Image (spheres, rainbow, N blue to C red):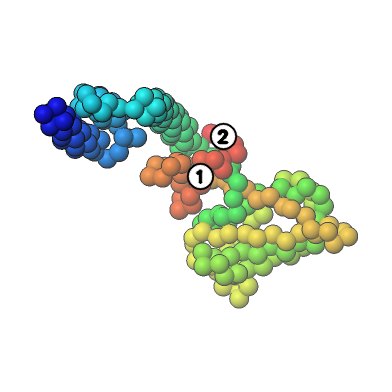
Amino acid sequence: MAAGIENIIAGQGGAQKADARKEAAAAAGGGIADNFDAFLTLLTTQLQNQSPLDPLDTNQFTQQLVQFASVEQQIKSNESLEALLTTSRAQNVATAASFVGMSVRADGKEAQLADGKAEWTLDVPVNAARTTIEIRDQAGNVVATRSGALSAGRQIFTWDGMTSSGQFAEPGRYTVDINAQDGSGQPISVKTEVEGVVDALDLEGQEPVLLIGEQRVPLSQIKGAMR
């Protein structure tokens, strides 16, 4: 008789455990790491539905408590990170908005050909005895080439839009590639910058983009600005 009673109690405990698992799964929803309350519900439901003849193992319970603490810490860390990212993005948007209407200087090889000219600012570290400047269209085709010497220092390179075939290029965006060498034939790294007035902003991506005509300049590439 006693054995029969024990079997009945054990059977009830098994049914309760099964119900507990179902309740826990329903509470967890998309995953315990995504919902602190769901994980708490899972743990307390499991404790409430233990079989008196087969209680939860102490080691297993301890492991679950450790997991519980880890989940709580992870969720709090994620919330803090999201708050920091939101604050950082808001600051970036505010900074980008302050540049609208200002003339900015930015790293970049791309410039806008408009009103018969496109300009790049070149930063030449030492005198360049031989320099080849290639201007490319948006498809990457070389449309014009200029060659000569460059003096050390910052200077403006202006392209009048004349192509190698003697035709005027269509207005639009063009990039510049510079191959420079010193007197002994050693290569020189020439940095290029672009300048222009910011007309608008594009805030769709992770980083604000400043619009200078049709030219797009990420905020991180801005080097300076003036009214």
Q: Position of residue 115 (x, y in %)?
A: 52, 57
The label shown at residue 35 is none
Q: Amino acid at mark 2?
A: Met
| Pick the front one: 183 or 67 | 67
How far apart in space, not on screen, are marks 2 and 1 (Cα)?
17 Å
Identity of the amino acid at label 1? Answer: Pro
Give me the residue at 41% from left, 45% from top.
Answer: 205
Q: Does residue 28 show up?
A: yes
Within 10 Å of disc 2 (Cα), the crowding (few <14, some 14-19, many 20+) is few
Residue 12 seen by the camera: no
Place residue 30 in its image quadrant: top left
Using a 10 Å C-alpha cutoff, classify the residue at mark 1 as few (fewer than 14 neighbours), some (14 to 19) or many (20 or more). Answer: some
x 16%, y 33%: residue? 7
Q: Quadrant of residue 26?
A: top left
The image shows residue 8 at horizontal and vertical percentages of: 12, 32
Q: Residue at x 80, y 62 (%)?
A: 130
The quarter of the image holding the N terminus is: top left
> From the viewer's perspective, is 78 left or right of 128?
left
Q: Is residue 8 left or right of residue 127?
A: left
Q: How many marks?
A: 2
Looking at the rendered structure, the secondary structure element under dot 2 is: strand
Depth order, front residue of 217/86: 86
Which of the two marks, 2 or 1, is nearer to us in this view?
A: 1
- Residue shown at 64% from the left, 56% from the top: 158
Q: Is residue 56 above or below residue 212?
A: above
The residue to which callout 1 is attached is 218
Occupied quadrant, residue 131: bottom right
Residue 169 horizontal side relative to residue 188, left or right = left
| Tag 2 residue | 226
Image height of 39 relative to 185, above or below: above
User: x and y percent of residue 36 in the render?
Assistant: 31, 28
